[in-house]
Image (tube, rainbow, N blue to C red):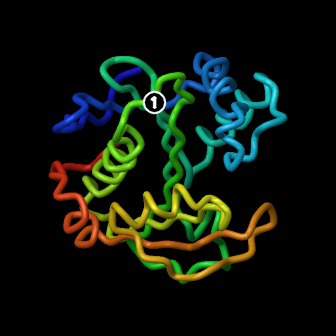
Amino acid sequence: MTDVFTRVDPGLGEFTLRPVDPDTDAALLHRWVTHPKAVFWLMQDADEAGVAAEYRRIAEHPHHDAYLGSWRGRPAFLAERYDPAHVELVGLHDARPGDVGMHFLCAPADDPTHGFTRAVITTVLAWIFADPATHRVVVEPDVRNTAVHALNSAVGFEVVGTVAKPEKDALLSICTRTRFLAATGAPIPSGTPA
């Protein structure tokens, strides 16, 4: 599959995104989403066929899509984008035109690279904000996921409040383009991401 977005991080180099191929990528994604560090991804007990089925469902959904991220040409993270008026936050969020929901997951690493996770979330947000129709990015991480709360804050998210979802209590947070730019200084390319 073809890359739909590329960002060169000043410290870590090239990051790219391409659509997930549910069948080809299932084995790789299964290793990532069932890893103990991915506990908040809520797929710990999934088998490879279940992972393929979940990403096939996402690929077919009109308001949800998934992308495989690479760093320096090697698969390294997963990103999902969704319309929170139709997925994840229906009835739990004051949805506005231009809202885009986001999830991301970094691949488990034996030897973590300093600044990698922040470079990934910056890349994902730059990709989403590259679409001029995007006004706010909305996230709903588990309230217990303190590491991602700190990361979200560092790239410009503001906490709105806690929402009760069927699978978790979530910390609803929103990032505007202005806050993202102020927090990261990351350039946002023009155009509409695929």
Q: Give the x, y percent position of residue 138.
A: 48, 67
Q: Give the x, y percent position of residue 170.
A: 66, 69
Tag 1 secondary structure: loop
Residue closer to the observer: 99 or 105: 105
Residue closer to the observer: 126 or 44: 44
Q: The N terminus lies in which quarter of the figure?
A: top left
Q: In this view, does 190 lie to the left or right of 112?
A: left
Q: Give the x, y percent position of residue 183.
A: 25, 65
Vertical arrangement, residue 161 with respect to residue 16, above or below: below
Q: Which amino acid does label 1 sit on?
A: Pro
Q: Give the x, y percent position of residue 85.
A: 57, 70
Quick one: label 1, few (<14), some, or many (20+) residues within 10 Å? few
For residue 113, what is the image quadrant?
Answer: top left
At x 67%, y 34%, the residue is 33
At x 30%, y 64%, the residue is 133
How many numbered callouts? Answer: 1
Residue closer to the observer: 51 or 39: 39
Q: In this view, does 29 lie to the left or right of 54?
A: left
For residue 50, what is the image quadrant?
Answer: top right
Residue receiving disc 1: 112
At x 62%, y 27%, the residue is 29
Vertical arrangement, residue 170 with respect to residue 58, above or below: below
Q: In this view, does 61 lie to the left or right of 183?
A: right
Vertical arrangement, residue 84 with respect to residue 160, above or below: above
Q: The C terminus lies in which quarter of the figure?
A: top left
